[in-house]
Image (cartoon, rainbow, N blue to C red):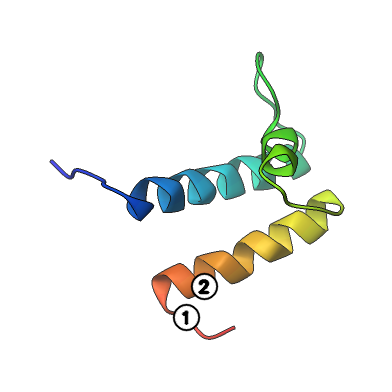
Amino acid sequence: MTTLTGSQIEAARLLTLRTMLKLEMKGMSKSRGPTAYSTLRMMGFKGTRQAVLDQLDVIRNQLIGEPT
């Protein structure tokens, strides 16, 4: 079992929201609650869905250590 602590929780949340946003862009959606896009906008991300996804890709690459 893995326990997430501190900044790992926020990183996991961003990665999950990134995946949800990709699915929303393909036409899938949750049945209840806010969309990933609206949640990310409340967190301070700006722009279109694609622009927000691009921002999340940069963050993801920084988290896992891949070059941009």
Circle 1: residue type: Glu
Query: Which image quadrant for residue 50?
Result: bottom right
Percent position (x, y) of residue 39?
Answer: 67, 35
Percent position (x, y) of residue 64?
Answer: 41, 71
- Residue with the mark numbered 1: 66
Alpha carbons under labels 2 and 1: distance apart:
5 Å
Q: Quadrant of the C terminus?
A: bottom right
Query: Which image quadrant for residue 9?
Result: top left
Circle 2: residue type: Asn
Is residue 63 at least partly visible in the picture?
yes
64 lies above or below 25: below
Tags 2 and 1 touching, CB below 8 Å: yes
Q: Residue at x 81, y 49 (%)?
A: 49
Q: Residue furthest bottom?
A: 67
4 lies above or below 32: below
Residue 56 appears left or right of 54? left
- Residue with the mark numbered 2: 61
Q: Quadrant of the N terminus?
A: top left
For mark 1, give the secondary structure: loop
